[in-house]
Amino acid sequence: MNKTGPQLLELSPVEGAPIREKYTASDKLYTKLKADVTQRAATLDEAISKSTQFHDKIDSMIESLERIAERLRKPPSISVEVEKIKEQMNENKAVSMDLEKLQPSYETLKQRGEEMIARSEGPDKDLSAKAVQDKLDQMVFLWSDIQALLEEREGKLLDVMDLAEKFWCDHCALIATIKDSQDLLKELEEPGVDPSVVKQQQEFVEGFKEELDGLQEDLDVVRNQGAELLTACGEPDKPVIKKSIDEVTFNIKKIGYS
């Protein structure tokens, strides 16, 4: 019409006026339509680009979270050595700090995903929205799971730390007491002939028996603590506890108490 319209207008300017109006309107409509299509194409390109970026970033986030979660689901066994437990607690805190570094990206992805779903017809009707929702759900689940695993690990480490500190403190105190008792036993003189000396020796022996009774009570405490620690610690460290308990038990038997 842009070609024939002006030609008809030259042949009959008066009668061609309506034709001019039509081709002018048609030209404007075409120009507007072309601009709308161009704008729509640009909008679609931008949406596709943003969608691609979103999926790439959330896929990367999910992979990172899965690696962290996998590590936490299979943690190293808890030690019975206080210093090693402290190291394990620091390792757990390091993972928590790694999670904190990811939090800004996590929050941004969560917000963008929710916005994308809000602009759609919803996950039930829009497959692309459902894909976004599925990935959001997976990311949020992993995030919550990791936080729960970190808290659980920290709680276990704190519990074992408390048990280990009590066990080793009482164990060391018991060893020191056993050594003192052994030294006293070595200093015990042969039975005397003087009645007063014999009486003193008898009193000493009675006192020593009371001390041995106290050792047995202390040993029972250490054994109970060791049993709790055996339940809480990992397999590699169990022999350490068993050996420590066996040693103090043997030394007490050596000085006359079983």
Image (cartoon, rainbow, N blue to C red):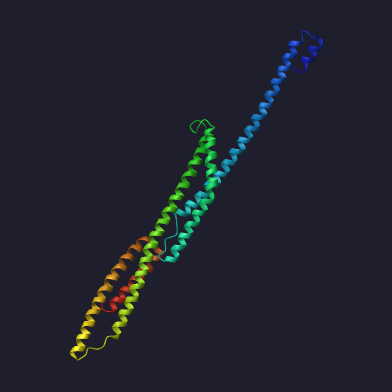
**Which residue does the image show at 65% across and 32% down from the upper left?**
42
Which of 118/7 is in front? 118
Residue displayed at 40% across by 62% down: 161
Query: Which quarter of the figure is the N terminus placed in?
Result: top right
> In the rendered image, is residue 148 in sight?
yes
In depth, the one of 143 and 127 nearer the eye is 143
Q: Nearer the viewer, residue 255 or 246?
A: 255
For residue 234, which quarter of the picture?
bottom left
In this view, the residue farthest toward the right is 10
Q: Position of residue 29 (x, y in %)?
A: 69, 20
In the rendering, at what x and y percent does residue 50 appear?
Answer: 60, 38
Residue occupying the point 60% across, 35% down = 47
Give how far across and how far down residue 205 sits, in percent: 23, 81
Q: Residue at x 61, y 36 (%)?
A: 48
**Residue 182 in the image: x percent, y percent?**
31, 81
Left-right relation of 46 to 251: right
Numbered disc total: 0
Above or below, 222 relative to 97: below
Query: Is residue 258 in view?
Result: no
The vertical placement of 63 against 200, above or below, is: above
Q: Quadrant of the C terminus?
A: bottom left
- Where residue 36 sits, quadrant-wise, is top right
84 up-or-down from 121: above or below: below
* Residue occupying the far left of the picture: 195
